[in-house]
């Protein structure tokens, strides 16, 4: 059986100048997560994001979905 782990990461409250970094993350072809000394390849599952402004939204927090870029094999 093959499966991919999917999870959501919240940015926490950020300033409006981080919108460009979020946009670049969504457009990235290669994204990696560090888990100790291990680099894990990820796919960005979030396909679009409405960018927020402090004037309209007050507190800016982004939730972005990721999934592992590989299948996890279950061998029993």
Image (cartoon, grey):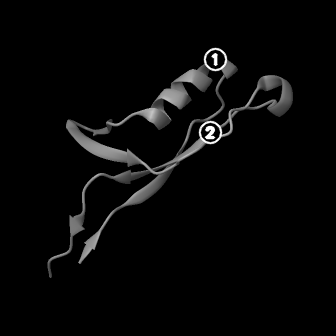
Q: In which image quadrant can residue 49 be found?
A: top right
Using a 10 Å C-alpha cutoff, classify the residue at mark 1 as few (fewer than 14 neighbours), some (14 to 19) or many (20 or more).
Answer: few
Label 2, secondary structure: give it: loop
Residue 13 drawn at (x, y percent): 66, 31
Using a 10 Å C-alpha cutoff, classify the residue at mark 2 as few (fewer than 14 neighbours), some (14 to 19) or many (20 or more).
Answer: some
Whichever of callouts 1 and 2 sits on the residue coming sooner in the sequence is: 1
Residue 69 disc label: none
Name the residue located 24 percent from the left edge and 62 percent from the top edge. Answer: 71
Q: Nearer the viewer, residue 25 or 5?
A: 25
Does the CB distance between marks 1 and 2 fall below 8 Å?
Answer: no
Q: Nearer the viewer, residue 54 or 47?
A: 47
Q: In which image quadrant can residue 38 be found?
A: top left
Left or right of 14 on screen, residue 38: left
Identify the image quadrant of the C terminus. bottom left
Q: Residue furthest left?
A: 75
Label 1, secondary structure: give it: helix
Residue 23 drawn at (x, y percent): 54, 30
Name the residue located 73 percent from the left edge and 32 percent from the top edge. Answer: 52
Residue designated by label 1: 17
Q: In which image quadrant can residue 17 be found?
A: top right
Residue 62 disc label: 2
Q: Residue furthest top?
A: 17
Q: CA distance from mark 1 to mark 2?
A: 13 Å
């Amino acid at each position: 059986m093959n499966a991919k782990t999917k999870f959501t990461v919240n940015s926490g409250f950020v300033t409006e100048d981080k919108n460009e970094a979020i946009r670049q993350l969504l457009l990235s072809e290669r994204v990696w997560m560090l888990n100790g000394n291990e680099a894990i390849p990820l796919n960005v599952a979030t396909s679009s994001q409405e960018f927020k402004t402090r004037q309209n939204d007050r507190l800016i927090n982004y939730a972005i979905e990721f999934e592992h870029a590989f299948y996890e094999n279950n061998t029993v």
